Image (tube, grey):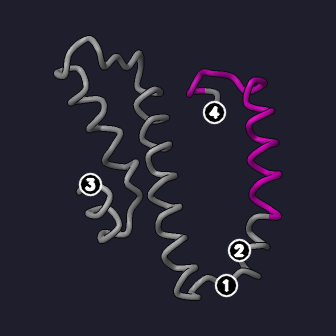
Amino acid sequence: LVTTSCQLAGIGGAALFTPIFLLVFPYLGPQYPLECAGSALASALLTECFGFASGLTGYARRGLVDWEIARQFIVVSIPTALIGALSAKYVSGSPILL
């Protein structure tokens, strides 16, 4: 329901899953622990990956994906994501310095 609503509105489901995880999970009991907001965000983004994969599969089956443009995005985004992930430990954790 959340993912469908977000898809219809044109936003990612993680935008709504994160607050849902933060606000609802504590009421479910101690068997659903989330240590911090980062855990809620990571859970929401992981859930979002399945939604994007489902959408991509549907569009690809209908032949609506321009694979040449997708390849160009992949060639840039994957190395950039890896560089960002590896260099994140060298960036200060203080939001003031960011």
- Give the residue displayed 49% in from the left and 34% down from the top: 42
* 65 horizontally vs 37: left or right: right
**Residue most toward the left?**
27
**Residue most toward the top?**
30
Cα separation, mark 4 vs mark 3, equals 32 Å
Looking at the image, is mark 4 or mark 3 earlier in the sequence? 3
Looking at the image, is mark 2 or mark 3 earlier in the sequence? 3
Query: Are the residues flagged by discs 2 and 3 in contact, CB closer than 8 Å?
Result: no
Q: Main secondary structure of the magenta part?
A: helix
Does 95 appear in magenta?
Answer: yes
Q: Which element carries disc 3, helix, strand or loop?
A: helix
Amino acid identity at mark 1 = Asp
Question: Residue 2, labelled with which disc?
Answer: 3
Residue located beneath label 1 in the image: 66
Residue located beneath label 2 in the image: 70
Q: Pick whichever, 30 or 23, lies toward us.
A: 30
Cα separation, mark 1 vs mark 2, equals 6 Å
